[in-house]
Structure formats: structure tokens, C-alpha cells
Image (cartoon, rainbow, N blue to C red):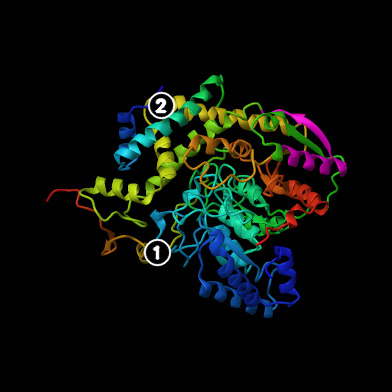
Amino acid sequence: MTQYTLKQASEMLQTKQISATELAQEYLTAIDERNPAINGYITLDKNLTLAEAQAADARIASGNATALTGVPIAYKDIFCQQGWRSACSSKMLDNFVSPYTATVVQNLLNEGMVTLGRTNMDEFAMGSTNETSFYGATKNPWNTENVPGGSSGGSAAVIAARLAPAALGSDTGGSIRQPASHCGITGIKPTYGIVSRFGMVAYASSFDQAGPMAQTAEDCAILLNAMASFDERDSTSLERSKEDYTRDLNQPLKGLKVGLPKEYFGEGMSADVQKTVQTAIDLLKAQGAEMVEVSLPQTELSIPAYYVLASAEASTNLSRYDGVRYGHRAARFGDLEEMYSNTRAEGFGSEVKRRIMIGTYVLSHGYYDAYYLKAQKLRRLVANDFQSALQQCDIILAPTAPTAAPKLGSDINDPVHMYLSDIYTIAVNLAGLPAMTLPAGFSSDGLPIGVQLIGNYFAEAKILGVAHQMQLNSDWHSKQPTR
Amino acid sequence: MALTLSDVEKIAKLSRLSLTEEEKQQNLQELNDIFALVEKMQTVDTDGIEPMAHPHEAALRLREDRVTETDHAAEYQAVAPEVRNRLYIVPQVIEE
């Protein structure tokens, strides 16, 4: 019974076909039944959920509701939410019940959205498969032997399994777009700075950006309208006037110039992904769009540049986890130094430790110029590449990931191979551009595959509009796994 | 350039991470694989390129120097491992 898109759920609530409490209860029942197989939710609190739903019903009865009042949503465990365990899927924060709420969550609570629970993720958002979570891997609802992608894999999986109509994710190097591709859902990483990062646990501060995940582009646009806001508590938040991200949904695609970056179509892409991207190209052409070849020459080097910069930022951000003010503290230690080292050794998993060590090394005396500064210079070249390409086209179409979802366990012991799987998503984060994934086909063994649309700064409405037109003329986004 | 075991030990110490012997060996191998990838950056000439620290290169916003937050010590310390008299308790660092 929980097949609804966010828009359908909203319409049912507004026309009083269902109450917010009944809707939340329907989802909670479905979660009880089907979540154990996928491990998409890691924290549930029925009392908190139903209290929010009852408040939404009271608001609807008072005539003071918005289109989102009473609509259920799930939050990636990276967003702090008062009264909820906000653990970032880490042992370090396993006992952390947040005393405050992230601005982006507060924006949705202000609309009256109902929290269904908190979704599984790679620990501190570090990973591309959702296998580094302290709470165990999330399984892909299309095939539970496969990963859902990372790091917002829990959010993607619960939408694919129809255990939430929408969810929030965060994208540092592709963490909304890649799991959206692997799970057959739609998700957008907005321009860096338009959604507040206050209360979102920091991994790599100059990259991290929250975004909506849902079944359709239209749902993502509706959610982004409520999410985006200037926030004086986030020093990287951009002061911009309010935009309507649904405004281009009905724009026809005739005359749209779509750039195809030649570096994204070389070796490494599976035949299934190649076929899927071609299908998307054909769909756009059929609606009057024109394809142009563009070039993003630094694509391959964006991976090392990203891992140097993101790890450097991670090593500084994660220095706060020392066992003093919150989170895990080791039981055994001698002096203060040993308390820090033992706490951090016990609290962090291996991928987090690895990135802290990479970051510590590249920032250390004697290596800073060769690695950190060099990577920052490459970051500028990558951003310049996009600006050149986007002068020749309106948007860029690209694959999201080189393959469909891999098998569980196939990448976890090979970090370099896992890092390379982010080749089509990472450059966008270096530049801070908006980009999204929408479903566009299936692999030969029945796993969903998404394609990526990349726009210039603040072009969210445009790319959401293109995706919506593609979804009006296709049905991949409405497919769902059989149970 | 290849890291040695003593490099890994030094990095772990700077990172405030206690590693087991097995973890040191594993990290040695994985960090060397990752730095082999990182070394590819050196193939690009970046002379004269301005480093880019932030996507919008916005200047850090400043606010007026006035109190905007009330006292949340009790809420924030409720999740602390050990507190006494509004102070966080850590092992003694100064000799008596």
C-alpha cells in the first residue's frame, strides 16, 4: 500500500483521503515487515513519528497546512535531529542523541513533514557501497546480494523499496547520485551553498551538500523548494533570494543543447551503462534536444585531487571526536593522549581511519605543497573545464556510475577500485555544480541504471525540468522491485 | 615514493589513532596503493594556477560581536562521557 510518490501522498492528505497518522502508520507497518531484509532504516521511533503525524493532522484541521504537511520523509543518519539518535552510522556516535536539529531538517519540520526514521549510510559518509556502516550493510532492494551504493544508500534503498516516499541524502563525491543510480530512484545534489550544512555532520566541508531523493524529479523539485534557504549559522551558506525549483518542469526540450563529455564515454563503462546512456540520448533527441560533444580533460585526475582534498578536510573535521565532549570514550587508557588514540581507534571503522591518515599525511610539513596545494590547483582546472563545456551547451548528460550495483563484498577490500567507481560524479563536487541522477534503464541482470544531468551554478530548475520531461516520456522511474 | 612501516606509525600517531600490528601492515599496503594513484596529479603542469579552496570562493561572512545564543551547557553536556560541575572530565594532565 505504500507506493505513493511524494506528490500523490500530498494530494491524498490535502483531499483528506487519508490522515497523516494513518499514512505514517501504513509506512511503519511496511517498514516492520520489509526493512529487516534491506537494513535501510537503522533508527526508528514510532512514538516520535506518530506524535509528528498527529501534530500534522491538527495543523491540517486548522487550515494552516502546506502541501508538505503530513507527508512522511526519511533522513540520512548524517543530519542531526533533536531527540533522535544521530549516529552518522558510526560506533563513535552510537550513543549520541542530538540536542539540536539541522537547519535543513528544521525547514522540513516547519512544513509539517513527518520523520519516519533515520537511514543507513557509509560511516561518516565515507564509502561508495554502504558497507562501511557500523550497523551493517544496506542491501539493494532489487537484489539483496548487491549493494545499494553509497554513501546515501539507506535513503535510496528505502525509497526503492517503497518504505518512504522521499528521503534526504548528502553528496560529497557522488553520494546522492550514485546510490540513486544503483537503486532506480531520482536524486539531486544542488549547487554548493544553497542548502544549509548546519547540523549535517561534516565530512569534507567544501564539498558536502544535502539534497532530496525521491521517485521523481517533480518530487525532488518540491522538496528542494522547502530545503533551500540562507542560514546565517552556516558560514558557507549563500545569500540568495528564494527560487521556485518547479518553475521549469513544463518547459519543452526543443532546442535544448545537451553536452556529451567525450572523456566520460571511454573505457571502463559497462555495456549495460553504455546502452542506457544511449537510450537517454535517444529520448532527449526525440523531444527535440540537440547533442554536442564537449570535453572535460581533467576527468581522470579529479579522483586523486578529490581524495587528497576531501581526506584533508576529513582529518581536520574528525579531530573533534576525541572522547571528551560527546560520543564514544574508550574504557581503558593511561594518559590523555592514550584516551584520544584508543577512543578514536575503537570508535572509527577502517575506511574512516584510512581517510584520516591520508588527510593527516597530505597536510603534514613537507608534503602540503606537493599534495594539498597541487590538488587545489587541479580543482580550479576541473572547475574551468566545466565552465568551458557549459558555454557550448545548456546541460551535460553523462553516466552516473561505470556499472550497475556491484555485489556485496566485491569492493570493500580494494579501496582504490572503490574510489575509481566515483569517476563520473566526483568532478561535479570539485566544481560545486548541481547535478542529478534519474533512472534510465536496467542492466542485463535486472538492476537499475541511472543517468546524470549536470548544470551550471544555480541551474537546478533547468535540470529538474529536463528530468521531468524525460520522466513524462518514459516509465523507468515508476518501476519497482518485486518482493 | 613509497611509505614505510615507520611512516605509517608516524602518521597514525599524528592522527591520534592506535593501530594494531595487523592494521599497520594493511594500511601500509593500502596507503601505498592510494598514493600511487595520487602521484598521477604530478603529471599536470599547474604552474601559475591559483589554488581553489572553495567552490564559490566567498569571503568568510562575519557577524556583529553580540550574544546570539543562550546557555545550552546542560543539554550539550547531557551527552558527554563524563562531566562534573559543568566541566568535562579528562585524565589528569598536570602533576600534583
Range of residues picked out in magenta: A274-296
Residue A75 in the image, given as x and y percentages of width and height: 56, 60
Q: Is residue A189 magenta?
A: no
Residue A432 in the image, given as x and y percentages of width and height: 61, 40
Image-based side of A43 in relation to A328, left or right: right
Q: Is residue A293 magenta?
A: yes
Real-space Cα separation, disc 1 to disc 2, in angstroms: 40 Å
**Mark 2 neighbour density, 10 Å: few (under 14) some (14–19) many (20 or more):** few
Residue A56 in the image, given as x and y percentages of width and height: 63, 74
Amino acid residing under circle 1? His
Label ID, residue B72: 1
Residue B28 in the image, given as x and y percentages of width and height: 37, 32
A223 w.r.t. A429: above or below: below
What number of labels is visible?
2
Residue pointed to by mark 2: A367
Q: Secondary structure at mark 2?
A: loop
Q: Residue at x 69, y 49 (%)?
A: A446
